[in-house]
Image (spheres, rainbow, N blue to C red):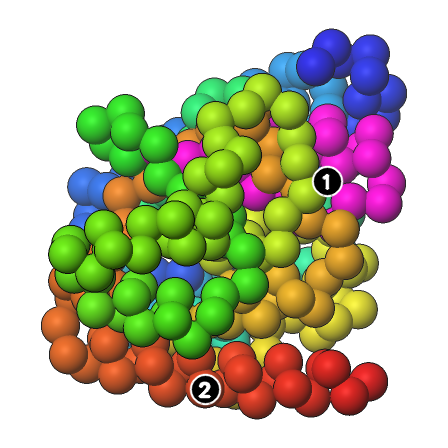
């Protein structure tokens, strides 16, 4: 996208929630964010920005102090939010969403590496497509393999398969899983509408986030991003906006995470049913 297409510079806030996060990984995230912010500024689509670094740990650990110092040294407008404890991913992001006054807001996981042009591409698209409320990235893992973060609305079967993540079951239901993850569409060079976006990287219009009051407070972990996606209107996957994602694999994180996963799914279903009545 050419700089002339964007026409005007704008402002961006970023919320990054930290909980027992690997320092090396988070350092890479912050450094890549800084590079992407600088590029967007140089291309004149971004005039100002603020990073909200949100600590969900009960205490301010030496690791958090180290990361805070790095963030402040690179991104001078960094604001540190701490002392509230582990209130969950969505509620923690809301601490930034409710107070930001910037035009756009990026919800960013601490295990994401941004391509240098990622913010430029995403902001430019939002500026030139005023009906779009959220843009999602084309994602890859550290080995360079594509990750299918955007999703279609899942059936109970898909949730069951996703929670167990057993190879033999995934093979039997491969067609359904491929459809769920837009593997019938990706890879592509064209932006296209999606139903659900991953919470690891959601670039949104702040006004749209505030209009739906950010993340629903009913969630602690998992499905808060799907719920937010459902509350927002037009959502686009933008192939030119690229990231490397190091997270995922719910089933491999242990029983407690599977329990959180299933509990959050039932909350999601409850809210979906409520939405269908409106």
Q: Position of residue 6 (x, y in %)?
A: 80, 22
Upstream in sequence: badge 1 or badge 2:
1
> Could you tell me which residue is drawn at 73 percent across and 82 percent down?
276
- Residue 122 in the image: above or below residue 182: above
Give the class, few, some or many, for how many residues have Cα within 10 Å of label 1's Cα (few <14, many ≥20).
some
Which image quadrant is residue 269 in? bottom right
Please give left or right for residue 261 compared with residue 152 in the image.
left
Please give left or right for residue 58 compared with residue 83 in the image.
left
Which image quadrant is residue 213 in? bottom right
Q: Position of residue 60 (x, y in %)?
A: 27, 69
**In front here: 136 or 30?**
136
Please give left or right for residue 139 compared with residue 122 in the image.
left
**Looking at the rendering, in which quadrant would you find the C terminus?**
bottom right
Give the class, few, some or many, for how many residues have Cα within 10 Å of label 2's Cα (few <14, many ≥20).
few
**Looking at the rendering, in which quadrant would you find the N terminus?**
top right
Magenta highlight range: 120-140
Q: Position of residue 169 (x, y in %)?
A: 21, 60
**Secondary-structure class at tag 2:** helix
Residue pointed to by mark 1: 11
Tell me the distance, in whole angstroms, between the alpha carbons under discs 1 and 2.
Answer: 36 Å
Please give left or right for residue 44 compared with residue 201 in the image.
right
Residue pointed to by mark 2: 266
**In front here: 270 or 134?**
270
């Amino acid at each position: 996208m050419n700089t002339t297409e964007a026409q005007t510079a704008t402002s961006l806030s970023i919320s990054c929630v930290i909980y027992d996060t690997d320092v090396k990984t988070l350092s890479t995230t912050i450094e890549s964010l800084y590079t992407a912010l600088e590029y967007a500024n140089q291309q004149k689509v971004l005039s100002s920005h603020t990073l909200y670094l949100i600590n969900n740990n009960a205490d301010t650990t030496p690791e958090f102090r180290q990361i805070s110092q790095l963030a402040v040294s690179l991104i001078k407008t960094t604001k540190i939010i701490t002392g509230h404890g582990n209130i969950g991913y969505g509620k923690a992001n809301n601490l930034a969403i409710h107070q930001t006054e910037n035009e756009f807001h990026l919800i960013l996981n601490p295990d994401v590496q941004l391509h240098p042009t990622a913010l430029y591409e995403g902001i430019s698209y939002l500026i030139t497509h005023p009906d779009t409320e959220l843009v999602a990235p084309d994602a890859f893992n550290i080995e360079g393999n594509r990750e299918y973060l955007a999703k279609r609305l899942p059936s109970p079967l898909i949730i069951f398969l996703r929670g167990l993540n057993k190879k033999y079951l995934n093979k039997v239901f491969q067609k359904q899983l491929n459809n769920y993850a837009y593997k019938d569409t990706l890879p592509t060079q064209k932006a296209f509408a999606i139903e659900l976006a991953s919470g690891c990287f959601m670039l949104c219009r702040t006004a749209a986030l505030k209009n739906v009051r950010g993340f629903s407070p009913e969630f602690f972990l998992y499905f808060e991003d799907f719920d937010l996606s459902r509350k927002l209107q037009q959502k686009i996957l933008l192939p030119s906006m690229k990231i490397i994602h190091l997270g995922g694999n719910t089933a491999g994180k242990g029983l407690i995470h599977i329990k959180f996963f299933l509990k959050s799914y039932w909350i999601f279903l409850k809210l979906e049913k409520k939405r269908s009545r409106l």
